[in-house]
Structure formats: structure tokens, C-alpha cells
Image (spheres, grey):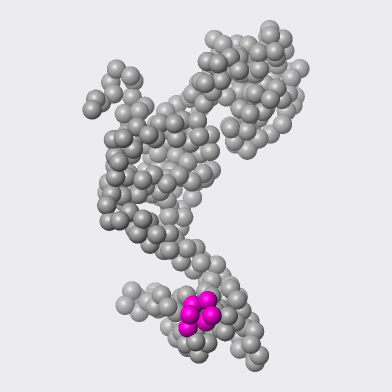
């Protein structure tokens, strides 16, 4: 293990990364504003400190990286990019307030979270929330997020999860199609819009009507926003969480041939974050705001 006191300098890391990217000490030196000799010496120093050879020097101007250099360089690039982003965040904050880096599900963010964010900013004007779409669990330390919105089962290695909500799903389509559907069996005559991460959703819905063993046909989409747009375009019938399509239902753009048949979802939405991040003021404020937004209307905090 390399102890902190023995860590190579940031200058050496940058010299190596640029040399690996260009395959040349000379071009790396031009980018870094240093001499070719200085860059070469920094890389040589890094090799001695790490105890490995990073480049094969066979004469000429072109460097040939070793396999360990390629592997190390790819991981180092991620860390240097993250360090640069952190530096920009601190500079942008002006020393006031705090930032929250949040990974969100595309449709949840677009349909539910972003329209409500103004109320969070009104209550916490010194906090900035940076949103990036990300599906599935990941390593928080590697990717640099403070928290994430997760849908599925309450399991995320190395993270704590706060349950936000459960959902209920409803069969919907454009009004012209809804008028032609009188029974669950009628749905089998139409394309059934499906989502990649919920391939069993339609089968579960049909089983609730004791309809099994039927061949389900229809296109597959990556996330709910695509399914919603496909349903609005009349491409077929969709099975969607009601909280994501409130606007379309209220405006009559989508209708359900079975409005009373709302099936509870088997999985939930969660706020996931490393336990250590509980000390972040921005995350504490965001968690409190989420709880208030999701509380029943008569129980929300005032002020």
C-alpha cells in the first residue's frame, strides 16, 4: 500500500496522463506548458515511486505504454476529471452554500422531481442540485455522486436507502384505442408497449385476470418517458405508473379502458446514499424536503 506521505505528486500524475494520451513527452509538454525534459523526469519519478515501468523507450519520439500503464491511465483519468469537477464546484460556489450531486432516473426526474425543484430552491436558496441521469446501482465513490434516486428492491451495496413511494400502474392508450377495448382479452389484439427493465409487468397484469400463456407482442423501450411518448403517438397500449402520467390523464390525451383496475407496483422508489453522506448539509436539506413533498397534504410542514 502506498502511504499518503509517499503519494506521487499531482504534477507527476498529470505528466503521465498527458504522455499516455499523446504517446509523446513533447506533445504532453506543450499541453502542460512545461519542457519535454521536465515531463520525462516527472514520468520517470512516477515509475520509481510506483515500482513499475509505464512506457517502453525504444528510441524515436513515440512512447509505447505498457499494459499496466493503459489500465492505470484509464482509472487515473476518471479521478483527475472528478478532481477537476470538484475544483470547479468550489470555485462556482464562491464559498457560500453547498452542492448536491444527484443521479436520477430519466422519467422520474423529468416528470416528478424537476417540476417540484423550485420549491426546494425557495426553501434552500444557498444549495445547488446538479442532476445527472443514471439507471442502475453504481459505486458512489468512483462516480462522484452524493445520492441517487433508485427504483427496484431496497438493495444497494454500500448504500443506505430511504423509501420514497410505492406506485400503482394503469393500462392507458389514446382515446381512439381505448374505445375499442372492452375486455382484457381485447388487449391482445394491440401492440403492448414494454419497458426493458420491466419485461414481466404485462404478464403480471394479465395473471391478475387469470389470463396466462398468451403471446405478448409489442416494442421494447429503455425508460418510461419513451413509453409515454409511444402511447401518445398511438403506437400501442402502455402499462404505466399513474404518478408519471397525471397531466396526460387530466387533459384526456391518454385514457384507460379499465380505470378502476389500478395494480400496485411490486417495487418502490428510494433515495440511496452512502452512510457517510448523512453529514452533508445539502443532502440533509434535500432528504427533509423530499419527506415533506411526499407527505399526505394535511401533514406537510408549514413555513
Task: Indicate the quadrant containing the N terminus: top left, top right, bottom left or bottom right.
Answer: bottom left
Q: In this view, does 183 lie to the left or right of 140?
A: right
Magenta region, residue range: 29-34
Out of 132 and 127, give the one closest to the viewer. Answer: 127
Q: Is residue 201 left or right of residue 120?
A: right
Residue 30: x percent and y percent?
Answer: 54, 80
> Is 261 situated above or below 59?
above
Residue 277: x percent and y percent?
Answer: 32, 49
Number of numbered tags placed on the structure image: 0
> Is 134 situated above or below 69?
above
Residue 280 in view: no
Residue at screen point 54% across, 23% down: 245
Please check the rendered image and state whether residue 33 is part of the magenta-colored stretch, yes or no: yes
Quadrant of the image occupied by residue 25: bottom right
Residue 181: x percent and y percent?
Answer: 69, 10
Residue at screen point 42% across, 36% down: 270
Residue located farthest toward the left when viewing the structure as drawn: 303
Out of 64 and 38, give the one closest to the viewer. Answer: 38
Q: Label the magenta part by its dominant secondary structure.
A: helix
> Is 44 situated above or below 115?
below
Task: Indicate the quadrant containing the C terminus: top left, top right, bottom left or bottom right.
Answer: top left
Residue at screen point 42% across, 46% down: 130
Residue at screen point 39% across, 44% down: 129
Quadrant of the image occupied by residue 172: top right
Quadrant of the image occupied by residue 68: bottom right
Out of 41 and 203, give the one closest to the viewer. Answer: 41
Q: Is residue 21 left or right of residue 113?
A: right
> Is 282 situated above or below 207?
below
Residue 243: x percent and y percent?
Answer: 49, 23
Please check the rendered image and state whether residue 272 is part of the magenta-colored stretch, yes or no: no
Residue 53 in view: yes
Amino acid at each position: 500500500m502506498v502511504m499518503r506521505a509517499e503519494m506521487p505528486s499531482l504534477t507527476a500524475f498529470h505528466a503521465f496522463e498527458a504522455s499516455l494520451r499523446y504517446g509523446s513527452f513533447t506533445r504532453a509538454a506543450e499541453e502542460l506548458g512545461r519542457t519535454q525534459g521536465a515531463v520525462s523526469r516527472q514520468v520517470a519519478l512516477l515509475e520509481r515511486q510506483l515500482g513499475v515501468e509505464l512506457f517502453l523507450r525504444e528510441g524515436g519520439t513515440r512512447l509505447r505504454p505498457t499494459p499496466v500503464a493503459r489500465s492505470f491511465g484509464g482509472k487515473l483519468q476518471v479521478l483527475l476529471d472528478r478532481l477537476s469537477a470538484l475544483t470547479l464546484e468550489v470555485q462556482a460556489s464562491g464559498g457560500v452554500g453547498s452542492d448536491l450531486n444527484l443521479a436520477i432516473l430519466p422519467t422520474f426526474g423529468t416528470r416528478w422531481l424537476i417540476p417540484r425543484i423550485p420549491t426546494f430552491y425557495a426553501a434552500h436558496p444557498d444549495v445547488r442540485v446538479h442532476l445527472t441521469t443514471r439507471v442502475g446501482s453504481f459505486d458512489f465513490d468512483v462516480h462522484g455522486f452524493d445520492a441517487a434516486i433508485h427504483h427496484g428492491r431496497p438493495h444497494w451495496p454500500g448504500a443506505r436507502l430511504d423509501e420514497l413511494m410505492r406506485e400503482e400502474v394503469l393500462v392507458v392508450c389514446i382515446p381512439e384505442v381505448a374505445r375499442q377495448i372492452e375486455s382484457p382479452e381485447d388487449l391482445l389484439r394491440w401492440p403492448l408497449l414494454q419497458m426493458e427493465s420491466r419485461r414481466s409487468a404485462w404478464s403480471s397484469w394479465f395473471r391478475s385476470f387469470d389470463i396466462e400463456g398468451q403471446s405478448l407482442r409489442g416494442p421494447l423501450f429503455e425508460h418510461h418517458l419513451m413509453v409515454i411518448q409511444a402511447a401518445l403517438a398511438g403506437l400501442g397500449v402502455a402499462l404505466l405508473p399513474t404518478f408519471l402520467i397525471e397531466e396526460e390523464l387530466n387533459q384526456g390525451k391518454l385514457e384507460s379502458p379499465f380505470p378502476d383496475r389500478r395494480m400496485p407496483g411490486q417495487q418502490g422508489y428510494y433515495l440511496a446514499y452512502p452512510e457517510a453522506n448523512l453529514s452533508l448539509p445539502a443532502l440533509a436539506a434535500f432528504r427533509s424536503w423530499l419527506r415533506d413533498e411526499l407527505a399526505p397534504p394535511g401533514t406537510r410542514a408549514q413555513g
